[in-house]
Image (tube, grey):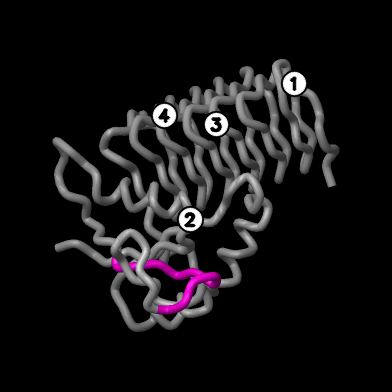
């Protein structure tokens, strides 16, 4: 029997999660059924991808107390990733309320630790001894090398390549098509731009772009 799943947010990440749950050709059905969304910017009852907005984010706690489902966060673009964990904390939900989603089309080592609320999308490849924190998004086609540690709330966008022994801090955003050299540390809340090639450590809060990556904005 499928359990209901409620997605926080209605943007592009939310649609990716909907596909993660519903689009599984050649694989067994998901144990989850998306019941709808919570979003502060849309009225209750509006439909997104055919599913209802169930209320604002503040409704999460009430829904958790009255139902047997779970939640997953879809808020966290390159513009909002630094607020991702604060938004989740503001719902009042505890870690056990969050589902961990791994698409069966992802190649994930058996020696990987994945925290609650994290999503690993179709085509992602995760090497051995990787530790993934809570509420992490690993986008379609992203690659994470062995012995890498990814902090809570980080977002790895589609097609990025993270080499082995990398440390990615909390609430970081690693842009689509970027590449990170082995043993590099990316500080908390940092942003790696689209297609950047990161060869050295990135300070906390900094934004880096280009090949090789250079600092566009210093950390705050």
Q: Secondary structure at mark 3?
A: loop
Please identify, in this view, whether the residue under mark 3 or under mark 1 is nearer the observer: 3
Q: Quadrant of residue 3?
A: bottom left
Residue carrying label 4: 141
Which element is circle 1 on?
loop
Do we see residue 56 in this rendering? yes
Q: Nearer the viewer, mark 2 or mark 1?
A: 2
Rounded to the nearest angstrom, the CA distance separating label 2 from label 1 is: 32 Å
Which residue shows up at 40% across the image and 67% down it?
37
CB contact under 8 Å: marks 2 and 1 = no
Can the viewer see residue 152 in this picture?
no
Q: Which residue is mark 3?
A: 176
Query: Do the numbered discs 1 and 4 sit on residues whose CB atoms are within 8 Å?
Result: no
Mark 2 highlights which residue? Answer: 11
Marks 2 and 4 close (CB-CB < 8 Å): no
**Residue at position x 69%, y 38% from top?**
191
Task: Tell me which label, 2 or 1, sits earlier in the chain.
Answer: 2
CA gap between label 3 and label 1 equals: 18 Å
| Foreground label between 2 and 4 | 2
Q: Which residue is denoted by mark 1 in the rendering?
A: 200
Q: Which is more N-terminal, label 4 or label 2?
A: 2
Residues drawn in magenta: 35-44
């Amino acid at each position: 029997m499928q359990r209901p799943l409620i997605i926080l947010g209605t943007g592009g990440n939310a649609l990716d999660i909907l596909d993660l749950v519903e689009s599984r050709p050649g694989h067994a059905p998901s144990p989850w059924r998306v019941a709808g969304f919570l979003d502060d910017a849309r009225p209750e009852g509006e439909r997104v991808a055919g599913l209802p907005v169930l209320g604002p984010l503040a409704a999460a706690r009430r829904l958790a107390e009255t139902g047997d489902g779970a939640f997953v966060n879809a808020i966290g673009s390159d513009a909002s990733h630094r607020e991702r964990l604060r938004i989740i904390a503001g719902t009042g939900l505890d870690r056990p309320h969050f589902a961990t989603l791994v698409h069966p089309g992802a190649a994930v080592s058996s020696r990987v630790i994945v925290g609650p609320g994290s999503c690993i999308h179709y085509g992602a490849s995760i090497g051995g001894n990787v530790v993934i924190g809570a509420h992490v998004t690993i986008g379609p086609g992203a690659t994470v090398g062995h012995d890498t540690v990814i902090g809570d709330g980080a977002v790895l966008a589609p097609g990025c390549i993270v080499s082995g022994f990398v440390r990615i801090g909390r609430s970081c955003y690693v842009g689509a098509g970027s590449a990170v050299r082995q043993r590099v540390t990316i500080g908390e809340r940092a942003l790696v731009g689209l297609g950047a090639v990161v060869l050295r450590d990135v300070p906390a809060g900094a934004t880096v772009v280009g090949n090789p990556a250079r600092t566009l904005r210093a950390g705050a």
